[in-house]
Image (cartoon, grey):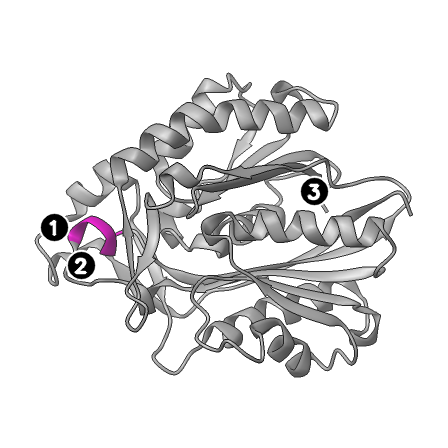
């Protein structure tokens, strides 16, 4: 097969909703302060007993059911995460076990918030090479476990969840060439610090300036490689880091009014590697993104890394 395409999506979010007013009772902040700086209103927080594997498996099960495939059809399982506790076996191997997938290659990928788009490209390349016919690609994070709840600059941002996509080999290509890379000179801009008790930390202004300055060019290049212009897009799903970043980047692209912009960050917060598949799944389920339309996926995060591609909406 000359290419691959996304055939189904799934998502999972914990039931607990943490509002800005809740946070105002924990640190020196307010609903107005958080909305003005980030655009976030609520975020979902996993229970203490709820793991990255639990969330990844739930999202993957939904995507697998929607695809109509059997567990034995899946030849690859990849989980993008930077918050999994278990180092071995991988989260992906545990997900495969829970879903009854018998013999797939299974591995985790850590590229921070850019993880899902990176994993999507790696799976696409594997399917093109004939290494598998169907793959599960999952982004799953328990950011609440690495949050410093005394730091009002970061605790207001983060949430938990998982999103998943089923990829299948296809005669007509549904995943465009990836644009990816990293800038190691900015490796400390987004990070998890302290090996034993990791905590999320970032240089907010550095991230904002880099994202608003560099992402529009990366987005245009992903469109060019897919053979379209930004005006041809049906939708744009960026990493849901901050509403101000999303609005600044999409504004610089000069998109027409019909292009749907994902703003899942308002309700879900920053869920790192889970944010792109969560937002994409929600927009397709609601019908806001038309089946068959070209959608730009674009993510960035620790490293400082980035990855993006144009995909055909399932």
Which residue lies at the image location 16% right of the left edge and 42% below the top edge?
33
> Can you identify the residue that label 3 sits on?
313
> Can you identify the residue that label 2 sits on?
23
Within 10 Å of the Cα at label 3, are there few (<14), some (14-19), or many (20+) other Cα atoms?
many
The percent coordinates of residue 154 (x first, y second) are: 24, 52
Q: Are marks 3 and 2 in contact (CB under 8 Å)?
A: no
* N-term mark: 3 or 1: 1
Membership of 46 in magenta stretch: no
Q: Is residue 156 left or right of residue 164?
A: left
Q: Nearer the viewer, residue 93 or 60?
A: 93
Residue 141's quadrant in the figure? bottom left
Within 10 Å of the Cα at label 2, are there few (<14), some (14-19), or many (20+) other Cα atoms?
some
Magenta highlight range: 152-156
The percent coordinates of residue 11 (x first, y second) are: 56, 61
* N-term mark: 2 or 1: 2
> Can you identify the residue that label 1 sits on?
29
Q: Is residue 297 visible?
A: no
Residue 301's quadrant in the figure? top left
Q: Nearer the viewer, residue 151 or 66?
A: 151
In whole angstroms, how far apart are the C-alphas of marks 3 and 2?
36 Å
The percent coordinates of residue 239 (x first, y second) are: 47, 43
* N-term mark: 3 or 2: 2
In the image, residue 308 above or below residue 96:
above
Which residue lies at the image location 68% right of the left edge and 76% below the top edge?
96
**Residue at the limit of the structure toward the front, as seen here:** 185
Q: Nearer the viewer, residue 281 or 96?
A: 96
Q: Secondary structure at mark 2?
A: helix
Membership of 154 in magenta stretch: yes
Q: Is residue 197 left or right of residue 257?
A: left
């Amino acid at each position: 097969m000359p290419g691959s395409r996304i055939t189904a999506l799934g998502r999972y979010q914990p039931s607990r909703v943490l509002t800005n007013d809740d946070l105002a009772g924990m640190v020196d902040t307010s609903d107005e302060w958080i909305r003005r700086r980030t655009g976030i209103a609520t975020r979902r927080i996993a229970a203490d007993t709820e793991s990255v594997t639990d969330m990844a498996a739930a999202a993957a099960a939904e995507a697998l059911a929607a695809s109509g495939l059997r567990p034995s059809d899946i030849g690859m399982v990849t989980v993008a995460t930077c918050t999994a506790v278990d180092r071995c076996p991988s989260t992906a191997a545990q997900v495969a076990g829970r879903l009854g997938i018998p013999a797939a290659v299974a591995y985790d990928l850590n590229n921070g918030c850019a993880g899902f788009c990176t994993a999507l490209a790696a799976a696409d390349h594997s399917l093109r090479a004939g290494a598998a016919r169907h793959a599960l690609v999952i982004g799953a994070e328990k950011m609440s476990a690495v949050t410093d709840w005394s730091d009002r600059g970061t605790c207001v941002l983060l949430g938990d969840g998982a999103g998943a996509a089923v990829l299948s080999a296809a005669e007509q290509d549904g995943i465009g060439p990836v644009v990816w890379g990293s800038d190691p000179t900015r490796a400390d801009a987004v990070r998890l610090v302290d090996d034993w008790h990791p905590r999320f930390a970032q240089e907010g202004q550095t991230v904002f300036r880099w994202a608003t300055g560099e992402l529009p060019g990366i987005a245009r290049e992903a469109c060019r490689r897919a053979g379209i212009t930004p005006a041809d897009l049906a939708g744009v799903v960026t990493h849901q880091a901050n509403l101000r970043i999303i609005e600044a980047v999409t504004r610089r692209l000069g998109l027409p009014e019909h292009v749907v912009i994902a703003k899942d960050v308002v309700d879900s917060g920053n869920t790192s590697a889970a944010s792109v598949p969560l937002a994409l799944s929600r927009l397709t389920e609601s019908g806001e993104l038309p089946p068959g339309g070209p959608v730009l996926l674009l993510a960035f995060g620790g490293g400082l890394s980035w990855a993006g591609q144009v995909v055909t909406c399932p």
